[in-house]
């Protein structure tokens, strides 16, 4: 069974991103200067989905005690997107997560110790 174009593109991009010599800044420059606005709009749509899915992942990883700079940035950017364009179905998901959320006490800092 043949893979869809999206899967092929994702595999190639993953291969390039894992290469130590790959420069995201150069790729961003080429994409924004050499291609049409339609291509750039599609790219921004892709980035928006990546931000959305990583912000959801940030919530689940945070509850486990793990996170990364990229996930934290995605959460912040999603909040900014929600403020600019309005939240879609994300509010329902976030509110349901907050009700179930309990933080492991070993990650809480004692403010009196400072």
Image: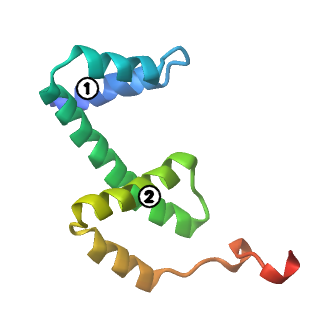
Q: Nearer the viewer, residue 59 or 2?
A: 59
**Few, some or many C-alpha atoms within 10 Å of disc 2 (few <14, some 14-19, many ≥20)?**
many
Residue visible at 36% across and 74% down?
94
Horizontal arrangement in the rendering, residue 67 relative to residue 33 (left or right): right
Residue occupying the far right of the picture: 113
Tell me the tag on residue 89: none
* Disc 2, SS: helix
Image location of residue 75, percent across then percent down: 44, 58
Residue occupying the far bottom of the picture: 99
Horizontal arrangement in the rendering, residue 47 relative to residue 72 (left or right): left
Horizontal arrangement in the rendering, residue 68 relative to residue 40 (left or right): right
Identify the residue position indicated by label 1 in the image: 9
Q: Nearer the viewer, residue 17 or 85?
A: 85
Identify the residue position indicated by label 2 in the image: 75
Please identify the quadrant where the C terminus is shown.
bottom right
Please identify the quadrant where the N terminus is shown.
top left
Residue visible at 46% across and 65% down?
59
How many discs mark residues in the rendered view? Answer: 2
Image location of residue 63, percent across then percent down: 54, 69
Q: Is residue 82 above or below residue 108?
A: above
Q: Quadrant of residue 41?
A: top left
CA separation in Å, label 1 and label 2: 25 Å
* Disc 1, SS: helix
Image location of residue 45, percent across then percent down: 22, 42
Residue 25 visible here: yes
Q: Is residue 47 above or below residue 38?
A: below
């Amino acid at each position: 069974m043949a893979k869809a174009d999206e899967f092929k593109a994702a595999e190639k991009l993953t291969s390039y991103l894992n290469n130590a010599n790959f420069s995201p800044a150069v790729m961003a420059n080429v994409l924004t200067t050499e291609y049409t606005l339609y291509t750039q709009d599609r790219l921004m749509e892709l980035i928006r989905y990546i931000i959305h899915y990583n912000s959801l992942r940030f919530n689940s990883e945070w509850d486990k005690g793990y996170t990364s700079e990229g996930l934290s940035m995605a959460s912040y950017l999603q909040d900014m997107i929600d403020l600019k364009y309005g939240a879609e179905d994300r509010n329902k998901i976030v509110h349901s997560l907050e009700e179930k959320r309990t933080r492991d006490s070993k990650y809480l800092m004692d403010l009196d110790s400072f």
